[in-house]
Image (cartoon, rainbow, N blue to C red):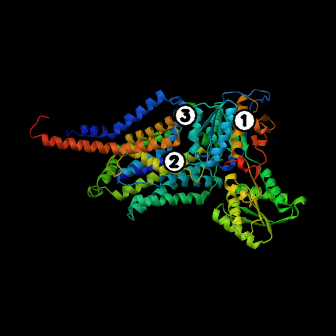
Amino acid sequence: MSRYRVLRVLTAATLALTLAACGGTTKDDTSGEQGGGQATGVADPDAELKEGVTMAYLPKQLNNPYSDIEVSGGEEALGELKGEYKLVGPNDASASSQVSYINTLIQQQHDVIGIAANDPNAVCPSLNQARDSGIKVVAFDSDAAKECRDVFINQASTQGIGEKLVEMTSKLAGGSGEIAILSATPNATNQNAWIEVMKTELAKPENKGLKLVKIAYGNDEDQKSFQEAQGLLQSYPNLKVIVSPTTVGIAAAARYVSSSNYKGQVAITGLGTPNQMREYIKNGTVTEFALWNPADIGYLAAYAGVALVSGQITGKEGETFTAGKLGDYEIGADGEIVLGPPTVFDSGNIDDFDF
Amino acid sequence: MSDNPVARRLSRVAGWDAAIIVVAILALVVAGGAVENFATTRNVGFLVLDLLPIALLALPMTLVIITGEIDLSVASTLGLTSAVLGSLWNSGMAIETIIPLCVLLGAVLGAVNGVFVTVFRLPSLAVTIGTMALFRGLAFVVLGDSAVADFPAAFTGWATGTIGDGPVPNVLVPLLVLAAVFVVVLHATPVGRAVFAAGASEQTARFSGVRVDRLKFWLFVASGAVAGLAGVLWTLRYSSARADNGFGLELAVVAAVLLGGVSIFGGKGAMPGVLAGVLLLATVQNALRLEDVSNEALNIVTGALLIVSVLLPNIGRSVRAATHRRRLRQSPTDPIS
């Protein structure tokens, strides 16, 4: 029937439309095509910090308690710098939802965009458009591809976190004894990177008394982590420390221990948030744990942004700037600025933090 | 009422369709005048890029909804083609081969919907809710949580670039070509008349010789193929093949189609209205965002627009019906009016 030919033609047209000229561009042709052409211009370390810099924060998503604290640090810093603070963002943390917001910010001609990228590459073309029109881009928390931002504020280096975890563990174990790790999922990238550093640290002579007996996985689920903590203590009665580099794991382990007869015999430490862990610090189950201070990330991002706008830094390795109360920073390889060693929380300082 | 077919056609067009076109133009004018930075060539480029996937998917969706069916799997088809695109690219295949394959994959996925609806006689709402979950699930099987990003710059640059570095985005070309094709098919061919007939009354259409099942099957295929193309363009625009690409987009598409005056019960609608609906939604969102309106408020405005678009024609209809009844009552005493 002829009328259906139209539909077929339509489908065929759709197909034909996408048939580009023959040529054949494959993955191999493009390798090496990308690569960081960034940091142009010359930094003037003595340049004065400009006032009235407008900086817009674009976190992964709005109304997320963790991002709220991050950007609150930015608001504080921009207040100190007499700049203008703005917060925009999507309600969902999907890959592409940030792009429209970047486009809007380009139109509004802000001086700096601070972004925690949901997808390092999806935001890239827009961020580069922003940079082409003179906007400085500071990635924080979650990096954008390095060729499309000026600097990245890294909350803590993998090395720094791994070392801190072993340092706390060793202190709590009194230098020797059995220890176990309670991680998230077996293939969690950052968890595994930290665990690798911990293993290297544990292999050093000064830690030879510590014996890692097991790495358990609680999948970042409260109940599973709780059961895994329980299992660890049953299988290894001489366990001295459980170290959990995940906020879910450490809270679940602390909850189990505080309600069992192991309380006082086994120490819990790792990465946790003060609000989750306050109860266990107060009741003595947990002596100390660590985490970066999210507010400092936003704070440092603001100082880096204003330093970029003022020409103090351009994003090249080795450039330095001062970030208010946090002190001096040096830009590392690939434009990374590491916030510093994680903050250790104990009964002495935990009430100073609310996140 | 005149029996002149031209007048009848005019009065049909002059309904909700015309209203939504006027409102869309009005929104553009108001935004251009009142919103700073709206009427710049760059922002118009952003606007087109933002509305592109919704506009593309709305084209076949309009035909599907007019026949009284629905295709809720379009966004998942987009996601699955995006994932497959990324996976094939990783395997070393040439992008020029992958792109048509992805459109073909979309057509095949559409055919799956078509078979369930026309052969197994299942309601398209249920079928495409099922395939919506199924295709999205498969997308995650193909690519997992990872993303593929290293597509050739010539292609990703084209998807975000403009014609000759002027103000017109490249992607507007395929959109306009497809829009023209769909406008012609729906409003000037026997297929278009069959679409309206099948939506108005499937049985009548069958008795008049319309092969309704074949029609619907091919509409689902077209819907899938366009979703496949949208998946390719989405991936290139964001330089990121991901399984979650376009998540939730199907609702925006259905919203735009309904806002454009297409009846969800089938049988009524026109392509210009739908395109105006897409443009109106995108303009409002873009302008409000430039005015720093929060995302929550944005959702409220979009939702309200949609409710109004469904409500107003209904109110219009009841008012007309009431007037008609009054006229009927009055007519014996006042035949002149």
Q: Amino acid at mark 3?
A: Ile
Find numbered disc 3 in the image and state the secondary structure of the residue it sits on: helix
Give the total number of marks visible in the rendering.
3
Name the residue located 24 percent from the left edge and 42 percent from the top edge: B320
Nearer to me, B120 or A194: A194
Please, which residue is most extreme toward the front here?
A: A283
The answer to whether the residues at label 3 and label 1 have Cβ atoms under 8 Å apart is no
Identify residue for label 3: B163
What is the CA distance from the residue labelled 2 to the residue labelled 3? 19 Å
Name the residue located 74 percent from the left edge and 35 percent from the top edge: A39
Q: Chain of mark 3?
A: B
Q: Position of residue B68 (x, y in %)?
A: 35, 54
Q: Position of residue B229 (x, y in %)?
A: 51, 48
The circle on residue A303 is 1
Q: Chain of mark 2?
A: B
Mark 2 vs mark 3: in front: 2
Name the residue located 37 percent from the left edge and 52 percent from the top edge: A4
The circle on residue A278 is none
Identify residue for label 2: B230
Find numbered disc 2 in the image and state the secondary structure of the residue it sits on: helix
Question: In the rendered image, is residue A20 in sight?
Answer: no
Q: Amino acid at mark 2?
A: Ala
